[in-house]
């Protein structure tokens, strides 16, 4: 693969076989400011592109083998995750917290100046007091990333993510939300975000390294604003 042109960014995407990660990958490959995209996952994407470097990695509990791959990266888009109820509580925490923390450890060691875009979720609780396991674990992962030493950490907390393209929904709740989405979008616009819009925001903000150094938390309303407006709304680093 040819190296990126001068000034173009090197981007890592984790979870590119998922819904949001898949859109992030496609958008990044078309982005003029991105010269190389390294997609890291447990299974093949099934996509060929001159900018794409695909790396298979089976065990995210240990990312030490990725140290060389992650060297010299400008930003990472981390979309790896699983649905609540589809796995045990122990597995949910492992995927949500342990995999995120381990990947961040190796990325920071290899690319300490890189930015980190993290797909969290609405209701994420950094205090650890929530009764919802998803909220506690996402909050725990957020805290770890904010303390990891990255110069820029972007935490995205979407509410309902609309799939855009037809898919097999993971459970009954998602099937119902898809059915009522047209009305839900009108009545509660700040409680929904299209998957492709979310992915675009995650890539754009990380590539531009928007905002002051530190952590930036974007709730669903903020994510929508970054898509609708060409510049990031005024948000205080956290």
Image (tube, rainbow, N blue to C red):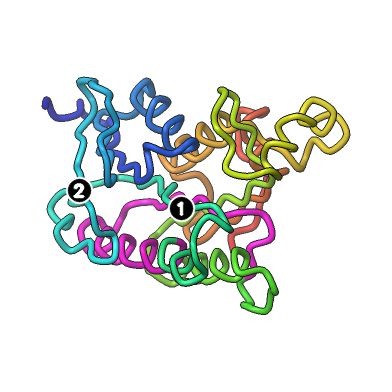
Q: Position of residue 215 (x, y in %)?
A: 52, 60
Tell me if I can see residue 193 in this picture.
yes
- The residue tagged 2 is 72
Depicted 145 relative to depicted 46: above or below: below
Pointer 2 or 1: first along the chain: 2
Q: Position of residue 155 (x, y in %)?
A: 54, 54
**Residue 179 located left or right of residue 68:** right
Q: Furthest residue to the right?
A: 187
Depicted 81 relative to depicted 39: above or below: below
Residue lying at 30% horizontally and 43% vertically, measured from the top left: 12
Q: Position of residue 167 (x, y in %)?
A: 54, 28
Residue lying at 69% horizontally and 60% vertically, measured from the top left: 123
Give the residues drawn in magenta, as a range. Answer: 96-125
Mark 1 burial class by Cα count in 10 Å: few <14, some 14-19, many 20+ = some
Residue 51 found in image quarter? top left
Instruction: Tell me, yes or no, whether the highlighted magenta stretch contains residue 141.
Output: no
Foreground of the two, 23 or 227: 23
Q: Are marks 2 and 1 in contact (CB under 8 Å)?
A: no
Q: Position of residue 20 (x, y in %)?
A: 49, 37
Secondary structure under the numbered disc 2 in the rendered image: loop
> How far is disc 2 from disc 1 in space, using C-alphas?
25 Å
Residue 64 found in image quarter? bottom left
Mark 2 burial class by Cα count in 10 Å: few <14, some 14-19, many 20+ = some
Residue lying at 61% horizontally and 39% vertically, measured from the top left: 232
Foreground of the two, 133 or 25: 133
Foreground of the two, 125 or 224: 125
- The residue tagged 1 is 81
**Residue 97 located left or right of residue 192:** left
Residue lying at 37% horizontally and 38% vertically, measured from the top left: 16
**Residue 205 located left or right of residue 61:** right
């Amino acid at each position: 693969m040819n190296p990126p042109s001068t000034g173009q960014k090197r981007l890592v995407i984790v979870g590119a076989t998922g819904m949001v990660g898949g859109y992030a990958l496609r958008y990044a490959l078309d982005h003029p400011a991105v010269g190389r995209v390294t997609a890291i996952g447990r299974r093949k994407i099934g996509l060929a592109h001159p900018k794409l470097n695909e790396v298979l990695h089976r065990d995210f509990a240990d990312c030490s083998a990725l140290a060389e791959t992650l060297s010299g990266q400008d930003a990472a888009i981390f979309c790896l995750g699983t649905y609540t109820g589809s796995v045990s509580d122990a597995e949910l925490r492992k995927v949500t917290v342990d995999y995120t923390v381990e990947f961040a450890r190796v990325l920071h060691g290899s690319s300490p100046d890189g930015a980190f875009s993290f797909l969290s979720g609405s209701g994420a609780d950094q205090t650890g007091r929530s009764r919802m396991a998803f909220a506690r674990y996402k909050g725990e992962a957020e805290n770890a990333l904010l303390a990891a030493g990255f110069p820029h950490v972007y935490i995205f907390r979407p509410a309902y993510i609309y799939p855009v393209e037809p898919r097999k929904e993971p459970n009954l709740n998602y099937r119902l939300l898809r059915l009522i989405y047209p009305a839900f979008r009108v009545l509660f616009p700040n409680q929904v975000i299209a998957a492709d819009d979310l992915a675009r925001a995650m890539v754009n903000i990380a590539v531009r390294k928007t905002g002051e150094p530190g952590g930036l938390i974007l709730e669903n309303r903020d994510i929508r604003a970054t898509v609708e407006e060409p510049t990031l709304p005024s948000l205080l680093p956290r």
